[in-house]
Image (spheres, rainbow, N blue to C red):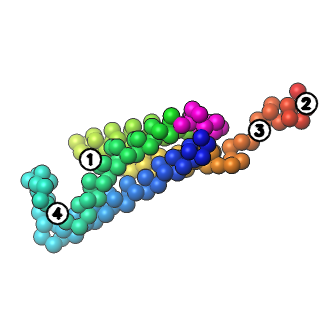
Amino acid sequence: MRSAYRVLAYLLAVEVVIQAATIAYAVFGLTKWIDGGGVLDKAAMEDASTTFTGVTGFMVHGVNGQIIVPAIALILLVVSFFAKVPQGVQWAGLCFGTVVVQVLLGMFAHGVPALGGLHGIVAIALFAAAVVAARRASTGSGSVPTSRQADRTAGIV
């Protein structure tokens, strides 16, 4: 279970990178399309035939961010209860909570664009939390005994 925890946590970190890459691909493709004469308005956004290099980046970012990433975070949280990783439940809970915030920010940023900046910042926090969680599950990492455990091992207590 410890290995599953580690893999899921690293996978969550990789997903943050994928999210950044897909949205960058989409925005740069959109910019090139507009520079070439494309017009982006409400009608173009609602028209399924509007296509440009990178348009799939928006779709992948949305599906990944609303389905795949939350599923991985939830599975990580469930696994954390069985993995016996030091502070594993707390780190998995932090990852899951951050994902919930990310999804909400992504949804509400369409109405309040300033939240988009916060969405990016929270993504970095999610990446960091996922990497820390994964590292705690690594062999020997996070398993430093407390002073009381060390005393018992040494026969002092």
Nearest to N terminus: mark 3 or mark 4: 4
Q: What type is the residue that disc 1 sits on?
A: Pro
Q: What type is the residue that disc 3 sits on?
A: Pro
Q: Which residues are magenta?
A: 79-90
- Tell me which residue sits at (40%, 41%) in the image: 70
**Residue 60 occupies which quadrant of the picture?**
bottom left
Nearest to N terminus: mark 3 or mark 1: 1
Image quadrant in which the N terminus is located: top right
Q: CA distance from mark 4 to mark 2?
A: 71 Å
Query: Closer to the observer: label 4 or label 2?
Result: 4
- Tell me which residue sits at (68%, 43%) in the image: 142
Query: Closer to the observer: label 1 or label 4?
Result: 4
Q: Which residue is mark 4?
A: 51
Nearest to N terminus: mark 4 or mark 2: 4
Image quadrant in which the C terminus is located: top right
Residue 113, which numbered label? 1
Q: What type is the residue that disc 4 sits on?
A: Thr
Q: Which residue is mark 3?
A: 145
Q: Residues within 10 Å of mark 1 (few under 14, many from 20)?
A: few
> What element does badge 4 sit on?
loop
Above or below 33: residue 149: above
Q: Residue furthest bottom?
A: 36
- Tell me which residue sits at (35%, 49%) in the image: 64
